[in-house]
Amino acid sequence: WLVEELTERGSKVVIPPRNNRKLQREHDKMMYCWRHLIENFFCKLKEFKKIAMRAEKTDQSFAANIYLAAAVLKLR
């Protein structure tokens, strides 16, 4: 029921179904690979203490810290 509800709202199912299901649904394998990489990026981003704690007072400074952390991760 959840998959149908999300599909009606315009979302796309990315997680593949289990192998033991009688009715297998379609999923995009390339999008699943990207989903994994994006989840790993957010996990690494949360290693920065200021981002994990949301310690900034303004939205602008929080966004600046995210950009700075992303640049540091890119250089690693």
Image (tube, rainbow, N blue to C red):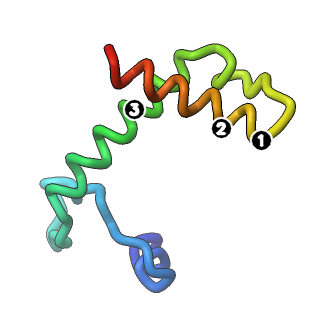
- Vertical relation: 6 (above or below) 58: below
The reply to whether dot 3 and dot 2 touch (C-beta < 8 Å) is no
In the rendering, which numbered label is found on residue 59?
1
Residue for badge 2: 63
Measure the C-alpha gap from mark 3 to mark 2.
16 Å
The reply to whether dot 1 and dot 2 touch (C-beta < 8 Å) is yes
- Vertical relation: 65 (above or below) 33: above
Q: Amino acid at mark 2?
A: Ala
User: Mark 3 or mark 2, which is nearer to you?
Assistant: 2
Q: Quick one: which residue is furthest to the bottom in this view?
A: 8
Q: Position of residue 17 (x, y in %)?
A: 23, 59
User: What residue lies at 44% left-to-right and 18% top-to-bottom?
Assistant: 72
Residue for badge 3: 41
Q: Which secondary structure, mark 1?
A: helix
Left or right: 54, with 44 as reference point: right
User: Mark 1 or mark 3, which is nearer to you?
Assistant: 1
Quadrant location of residue 43?
top left
Quadrant the N terminus occupies: bottom left
Quadrant location of residue 16?
bottom left
Q: Amino acid at mark 3?
A: Phe
Q: Which secondary structure, mark 3?
A: helix
- Mark nearer the N terminus (1 vs 3): 3
Quadrant location of residue 48?
top right
